[in-house]
Image (cartoon, rainbow, N blue to C red):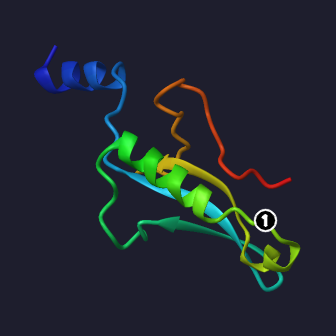
């Protein structure tokens, strides 16, 4: 077997290392809900999974809507995604978590 063939087999059997993280959320816009991310897709991703979840937590706490007249500013369904856009489980419990879930 050639080294390239063995490397393909080895690579397919290992967990892929994520290349960065973003916070995904939905925000209310005129006419409905719009998906958005931070950092923006044009900016470098957050390097640490833990840091990304901490940003998500603080963002969720900062965007809680307490009064009905603020509903137009609502930000919901906040969670961390990897470089491929796949949801990342919360590092503390290894379970998928959504902050400020839309009711």
Place of residue 65 in the rendered image (x, y in percent of width and height, measured from the top left): 75, 66
Residue at the bottom extreme, as displayed: 30
Residue at the left extreme, as displayed: 3
| Position of residue 33 in the picture relative to residue 48 (left or right) | right
Residue at coordinates 86% horizontally, 53% vertically from top-left? 103
Residue at coordinates 60% horizontally, 56% vertically from top-left? 61
Q: Is residue 22 above or below residue 6?
A: below
Asked if residue 68 can be seen in this view, the reply is yes
Place of residue 98 in the rendered image (x, y in percent of width and height, measured from the top left): 66, 44
Q: Is residue 100 above or below residue 30?
A: above
Residue 59 occupies which quadrant of the picture?
A: bottom right
- The residue nearer to you, when weighing 99 against 9, is 99
Place of residue 77 in the rendered image (x, y in percent of width and height, measured from the top left): 69, 54
Q: How many marks can you see?
A: 1
Q: Is residue 77 above or below residue 95?
A: below
Asked if residue 82 can be seen in this view, the reply is no
Q: Which quadrant holds the N terminus? A: top left
Name the residue carrying label 1: 66
Place of residue 45 in the rendered image (x, y in percent of width and height, measured from the top left): 34, 58
- The residue nearer to you, when weighing 83 against 33, is 33
Residue at coordinates 20% horizontally, 24% vertically from top-left? 7
- The residue nearer to you, when weighing 65 against 52, is 65
| Position of residue 63 in the picture relative to residue 29 (left or right) | left
Mark 1 nearby-residue class (10 Å; few <14, some 14–19, many ≥20): few
| Position of residue 19 in the picture relative to residue 77 (left or right) | left
Residue at coordinates 46% horizontally, 65% vertically from top-left? 38
SS type, badge 1? loop
Residue at the front extreme, as displayed: 67
């Amino acid at each position: 077997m050639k080294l390239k063939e063995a490397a393909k087999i080895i690579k397919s059997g290992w967990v892929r290392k994520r290349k960065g993280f973003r916070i995904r959320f939905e925000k209310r816009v005129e006419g409905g809900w719009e998906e958005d991310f931070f950092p923006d897709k044009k900016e470098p991703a957050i390097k640490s999974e833990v840091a990304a979840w901490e940003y998500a937590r603080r963002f969720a706490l900062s965007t809680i809507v307490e009064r009905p007249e603020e509903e137009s500013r609502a930000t919901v369904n906040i969670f961390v995604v990897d470089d491929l856009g796949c949801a990342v489980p919360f590092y503390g419990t290894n379970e998928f978590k959504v902050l400020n879930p839309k009711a």
